[in-house]
Image (tube, rainbow, N blue to C red):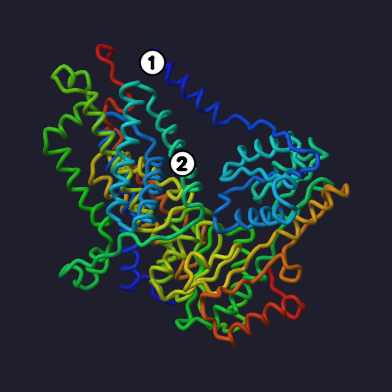
Amino acid sequence: MTDVFSVSVIVGILTSAIRLATPYLYAAIGETFAQRSGVLNLGVDGIMLVAAYGSFYVVLKTGNIWFGLLAAIIIGLLMGLLMSFISVTLKAEQGISGIGLYMFGLGLSSLLFKTTIGTVKTVTGFQPVKLPLLGDIPIVGNIFFNHSLLVYGAFLLVPLAWWVLEKTTWGLKIKSVGQNPAAADSLGVSVERVRYTSVCIGAILAGIAGASLSISLLNLFQDNVTAGQGFIAVALVYFGGWRPFGVLWGALLFSTVNAFQLWMQVLGVKIPSDVAIMLPYLLTIAALALSTNRGLAPAALNKPFERGES
Amino acid sequence: MFKRLIVVLVLMAVLVTACATPTATTAPAETFRIAVVMPSATTDMAFSQSMWNALTAIQTEMGGATALEIKYSENMFNVPDAATAIRDYASQGFDVVIAHGSQYGSSVQEIAKDFPEVTFAWGTDVNTFGMNNVYAYTAAAEEGGYVNGVLAAKLTKSKIIGVTGPVEVGDAKTYIDGFVQGVTAVDPTITVSKTWTGSFSDVALMTEAAKTHIAAGADILTGSSQSVVGSIGAAKEAGNVLWFGTQQDQASLAPALVVASQVYDWTGMVREIIASHKAGTLGGKTYTLQLKNDGLKIVYNPGYALAADIKAAGDKAIADIISGAVTVQP
């Protein structure tokens, strides 16, 4: 039996972890934008599903992966506009409307899949690209620099999101709208516009998260292909304390433990599979319970803004 | 506040419309009516599709939709929803209601009492609850698992075989137990690694499990549930990893890499249930798909050039199981 702590196993675990973390990163970083502006979007999984379907369908028909990605972005934008309209303009209860959006996405993707494709098929999606020089570094190159473009994109997104939120005026507007919309409004910031943009950015990233499954990591579409990943992504935003690097750490922890438990099963380590499967969730719950992030929640999260009400 | 109320009302209206039960169709008196409730989609390339294919085959055999009406509810992974659908179909006067999932057992037990004139069939399980309008059905998945195992053991070069399982229950478990027995019967030195994802539908984790097996040296993979489409995708991406299917012929997903699939064929059972219903017998029996009653079939993929001597070993395993020379433990 292979030694559990051999180099090849550790490389295997970390490579898997990076792949597994990709859809969570897109979706959770996107949700971070929405929540920092004060909108809880629970429809992430629904957006991921429709975009996963849409990008898969486009790649299946055209063979062009970039058209597929574009389809995911457009679908994300449209569903983001829908979510913003319901939660910002109509000021509907955010949790409920998010669940509604999820159910809509689940049903729509399943219906479209049945009527236009019908059966499980595979496509050639984004292929792993070994980066020059970096990819040749022993061990590290294999773990980090031999992935598909969408995987690199997910990790580059983290510092970018941090920069936008922490270093730009726009980021400041997002945060102030999520923290104290009345004050932001009195200073001439359009709460509506900021929330619309933030929710739409989140939804576009959720769309890319869906595409990262259907045209990069799995290269197939099936009913409910996300299996609830969008909800894990929402949990990761809380886990990460509404900060991009916190989200990164949460996504990596969750996916590393998941990759670790798969390897333990493959190597035949004598732990019951049920315990192995529970590990990533147990650890996440434990980390969440011990973390002090709760105080970091945007003060106006989940509260529709009405001028002069508060 | 008013706006919010409107939104809630609109949402409610949409939900109510969406959930509204279809109105009973007025079918000619001679039309036989079957309804089926499934946990996944009719196109899942696995468990649900196996039943769907049987029903449509029989519909064609009987002469189309005027002779046999089929109604279905798919993706009923939520058991209370499934129970509602089962009850709806029964009260709409369907002749046979099939609850195609072992998770629907207690719902069938409860509902069948209220509709003594309707035949209920459910599986995979063996329990008819002592009711004479309930059939239970199951598949001896270990038999085809054994045959696949024999073939896999002959084909592996790395002597490592990966099994990507969903949840360690039912035919997912018995298939894999049979598979391991088949491998061991040929060569006990081969390592068979097993992974379970804890879900029938988590394609992403299933894919990663398959990639993990491949990274650990496996050159042959197998597994069950609708999420194995992910494993097959991973095998295809690796390019040189072979796949053995179960429940449904999975060759179309990777025509060059699928060696053989164990196929569930419920046609014979459904045909018999219809005939018995017409003759006045509504249930009280358990069906088991086996190689010897043609309920299980090993379908070799014509797209994969299987060496004649290896195919012969597979055929011998089939014959031995049918004759009883080999007993596979579930």
| Tag 2 secondary structure | helix
Q: Quadrant of residue B182?
A: bottom right
Q: At 72% across and 76% down in the image, what residue appears?
A: B321
Number of residue marks = 2
Residue A222 point in image, percent of width and height = 47, 52
Q: Is residue A289 visible?
A: no
Q: Is residue A216 above or below residue A284?
A: below
| Tag 1 secondary structure | helix
Q: Looking at the picture, which amino acid does disc 1 mark? A: Lys
Residue nearest the observer in this picture, A280 or B319: B319
Q: Is residue A40 visible?
A: yes
Q: Quadrant of residue A259?
A: bottom left
> Which image quarter is the N terminus of chain A in?
bottom left
State the residue position of label 1: B3
Q: Chain of mark 2?
A: A
Q: Chain of mark 1?
A: B
Residue B141 point in image, percent of width and height = 66, 65
Other residues around mark 2 within 10 Å, as few (<14) / some (14–19) / many (≥20) = many
Q: At 65% across and 38% down in the image, what residue appears?
A: B85
Residue B284 as seen in the image, left or right of residue A186: right
State the residue position of label 2: A106
Q: Looking at the picture, which amino acid does disc 2 mark? A: Leu
Mark 2–mark 1 Cα distance, whole angstroms, equals: 26 Å
Q: Is residue B149 above or below residue A43?
A: below
Residue nearest the observer in this picture, A120 or B314: A120
